[in-house]
Image: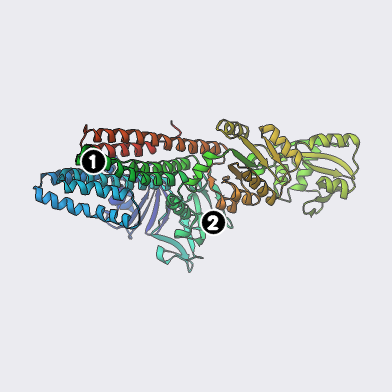
Amino acid sequence: MKYAIAHELPGRIRLRCGRGAFSRDDAGVIEYLLESQDGVMSAEATHKTGSILILFSNGARDGVLSAVRLIDRSYLDNESLPARPREESIAGSAFVLFVRSVLNRLSPLPIRLAINTLRYMPYLFRGIKSLISGKLDVSVLDASAIGVSLLLGDVSTAGTIMTLLTFGDVLESWTKERSKRRLAEGLALNESFFWIERDGAQVRIPASELAIGDNVVVRAGSVIPVDGSVVRGNASVNQAIMTGEPLSLHRYPGTSVFAGTLVEDGELIVRVTAFDSETRINRIVKMIDESENMKAKIQDRAENMADGIVPYSFLLAGLAYLVTGDVVKATSALLVDYSCAIKLSTPLAILSAMREGTRHGIVAKGGRILEKIAEADTVVFDKTGTLSVASPTVADVVPFAGFTRKQVLRTSACLEEHFPHSIARAVVRKAEEENLQHREDHAEVEYSVAHGIVSHIGDVRVIIGSDHFVLEDEHTPISDVERDIISGLSHHYSLLYLAAGGRLAGIICIEDPIREEAAGVVADLRGEGIKNIVMLTGDNYNNAEYVARELGIDCFRAQLLPEQKTEFVQKLKDEGRCVIMIGDGINDSPALSVADVGIAMKESADIAREISDVVLTHNDLKSIVTARKISTGVMRRIHKNYVFIVAVNSALLAMGLSGVITPASSALFHNASTIGASMSSMRPLLEE
């Protein structure tokens, strides 16, 4: 196996083999092989990063490296070597149940009767418990069907029913856990030990000893195990697991890092602010794990409907007995019900849709949200940072009074580079793009917050800032021609004014570019059945009107305060509309909270992400259209499941009452239809 030494200390070495060098199962074999070597105390292979951490005794280094070099596919594919445990196979569970069933049938009748009576007890107790609670539900139905079969001496049918019900329980548990595990796959982070700085040395401590304020050492190739602040070091950190962004970020003293992210290059000393269950990544895992409890109304309706059918099953069984006098046919009515498939397929469809959403950068905080997205008829967008990129750029430079374009841009960049706000950075970046160099020959600058900058170049006084500052406060004269030019440009851009020697030297046109995909997303949302698309912004009317016109938005409101945005969303709801609100800032948070569904952009403020119902992990508005497609798709699938379940089970019921099939066959086909509906619920929605 090829490797590079990523980091080394006495008795400890980390090797980097490259991403994709080995699989999860391969990692278990690698650990086993290395820990079998003399002098190796422990080995930890991480398949996500392709790195191997080895702790060894003095003098064992060369042997360790030789062992790594010798590992190849012949070892990794050797089935006799142990690997990490695999998730329990549904086929294995089915095989165990099959073997038990066969052995049961081969046993003498008295033993079979005793075994099946004991197996029946849990079903009987569950049924009695439901009756005591005043419920006539599925538990009562199951207990009755098995009990009648045992009373009739039909031990085989009773055994078959219990085997199928057990398999149904195994299937339900397996599919739900598998769906939840896939939904949270790659998020959970469980560390058994940490390297920290203590008394000037780096020491290895167990996880139980870690405390807030400790300085954790994280080296290249390692996953950051805690949330914290960088106190020393520089590194490139891949935060794709948190943000979906494939490009690494530079982390340096004073910046924050999060558990689960990967140090691709460099080394960091991180002061712990949260660890274990309190990290952001583990809160996400917990949210996913608990999301099943946030049931959609349609899921509640499905479960209520399933239990509501049970009394009719008993009524039908009673009528069948009165008409035919045949207990076997009456029992068939008890063995075929609609509830199992309905109660299992609906939550699985919702859970599968949530999992599919995460693969497309959509993290929904519960099944209820998917239903609301499907029902929505109105989408409300914030403008800045949502429909626009929230990164100002220089669109144009217009000189006046004999100044040249280059002079205006060069002088503006010379002044603005001292103040790193977003518009200043845009001006400096534009000058750099045009290779306009300047000398630091101006005097000390004076900055007036929210107004502008004053300085001197030689004997010439220069000012740059807003129209209010330059034209009104500083009384810079402006001609009618200049005023007409400015009036035309102000409809599309924010303007920065430069004056020199008491004359207006020029203006710089600043724009916040509309996202490239925004117009297509608005059109696609209409195609997905959204009838009303609105834009709310705190920006000025002219800019808002321009964006709304460019994107084909139905209506907009400009110069709104946060509470006004909230009032507008509430008004839409009061009109009977189901509203999705998309925003990114602290000022959007109240409106996000009031909307039926609040969606936070990838780079949203923390509070916006916390209170939103959906968080996008891709920096792309197309995820909103995808969320709509997934949501409407899962609602259609649930409806199709209803039709399938009712049709199949009605047919089975008819055949059982007419004597075409036996009660055991009815139970078999019924459970087969349940499995079919469940498997159908787990298919990808966007591939249909």
The 10 Å Cα crowd at callout 2, few under 14, some 14 to 19, many 20 or more, is some
Q: Comparing marks 1 and 2, which lies closer to the viewer?
A: 1
> Do callouts 1 and 2 mark residues in contact (Cβ within 8 Å)?
no
Q: Is residue 550 visible?
A: yes
- State the residue at coordinates (31%, 41%): 337
Q: Residue furthest bottom?
A: 199
Q: Is residue 205 visible?
A: no
- State the residue at coordinates (40%, 42%): 346
Residue 688 locus on image (x, y percent): 43, 30
Q: Quadrant of residue 342?
A: top left
Q: Horizontally, is 226 left or right of 131 in the view?
A: right
The 10 Å Cα crowd at callout 1, few under 14, some 14 to 19, many 20 or more, is some
Residue at the spot of label 2: 233
Lower position in the chain sequence, tag 1 or tag 2: 2
Q: Quadrant of residue 519?
A: top right
Q: Nearer the viewer, residue 509 or 138?
A: 138
Disc 2 secondary structure class: strand
What residue type is disc 2 on?
A: Gly
Q: Nearer the viewer, residue 406 or 308?
A: 308
